[in-house]
Amino acid sequence: EVNIIYDLQGQKIRVSGIIDSEIHLNDNKRVIFCSEEYYKVNKNIEKGLIPIDIEFDFNIIVEQDYFSVKNDRIVFIKEWVKDDCVCCKVKGKGILRAKNGINIKSLSRANLILTERDKQDIVYAINNDVDTIYISYVVNAANVKSVKNYINKYLKKNGMNLRRPKIYSKIENYEGIENFEEILKVSDGIVLGRGDLAVEINSIEYPVLQEKIINRMKRSKKPLVIATHILESLAYRSKPSISETSDLYHFIKNKVDGIVLVTETSVGRNPGYVVGFANKFITEYCSEN
């Protein structure tokens, strides 16, 4: 029996899906992040426009000095601001595509509310018998309660016989780490989202932080899932790295409840092979422990 998990986008900032081609980036190139409305009006007039898909006030973006994508491999440094535009100089090289995530370390999500997209997705999840909902970018208990309240209102209005999904909170930024205890208290489980968290914290801090969360979750008796950077080398290779298999073995020994493969199955060349490898590895070592 396979459980169905629905991952809410939350306050994720992405390159808008309305761009009509890939954006090639090189060192010292200048690009302009803008609202979708600005892009629609000016895309044939100004070069280098990159529309951002967000539901909240664009001024929150204007206030930031630093953006990054692809795990900090490409960085954008703010140079000037005008209207709904932020001009940045590029550091790094790569290709930006529609729906690529954008990381902003200093962005506070504490006062951001449940998005309309998330509301629609919650309704879809309930009506399709989803077992568990993951909430992205949880920064405090209020984020979790807002989802639970929305589910309660929907069930009360549309029939309590519908399945009530479990709620897991994704910890993937500093605010989530700082408010971990209050988030854990109102969540059915925790997902350690290593992808975005790796951008927000110093890599030297991460192993200690991960160990603390694993030990805390053991005491709580609530499920812990580790997501992202599990067997990422298998997205393009046939053999995982030693550090990846060591990490996975460490999770098994510590009785982590689940792992989530992301890059390996979303853009990897052989997703079926990766899932099979992970399943075989886990089964073999779980039987020993």
Image (tube, grey):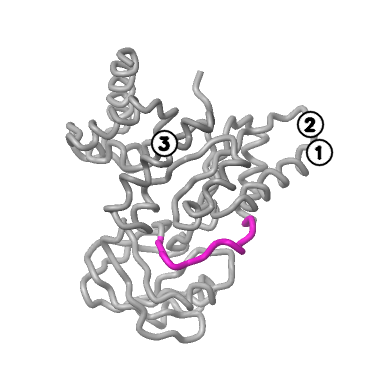
Circle nearer the N terminus (2, 3)? 2
Point out the image quarter for the C terminus. Answer: top left
State the image coordinates of residue 138 (x, y, percent, origin top left).
54, 51
**Residue displayed at 75% across by 41% down:** 152
Foreground disc of the pair 2, 3? 3
Circles 2 and 1: CB atoms closer than 8 Å: yes
Amino acid type of the residue tagged 2 in the rendering = Met
Amino acid type of the residue tagged 3 in the rendering = Ile
At numbered mark 2, what does the secondary structure look like: helix, strand or loop? Answer: loop
Residue 60, numbered circle? none
Find disc 2 in the rendering and name its residue: 160
Seen in the image, is 276 located left or right of residue 220?
Answer: left
From mark 2 to mark 1, how far is it between C-alphas?
A: 6 Å
At numbered mark 3, what does the secondary structure look like: helix, strand or loop? Answer: helix
Amino acid type of the residue tagged 1 in the rendering = Lys
Question: In this view of the protein, which residue sits in the foreground, 271 or 262?
Answer: 262
Question: Is the magenta region chiefly helix, strand or loop?
Answer: loop
Instruction: Using the rendered view, name the quadrant where residue 233 is placed.
Output: top left
Circle nearer the N terminus (1, 3)? 1
Residue 156, numbered circle? 1
- Magenta stretch: residue 114 in it? yes
**Residue displayed at 61% across by 64% down:** 111
- Magenta stretch: residue 262 in it? no
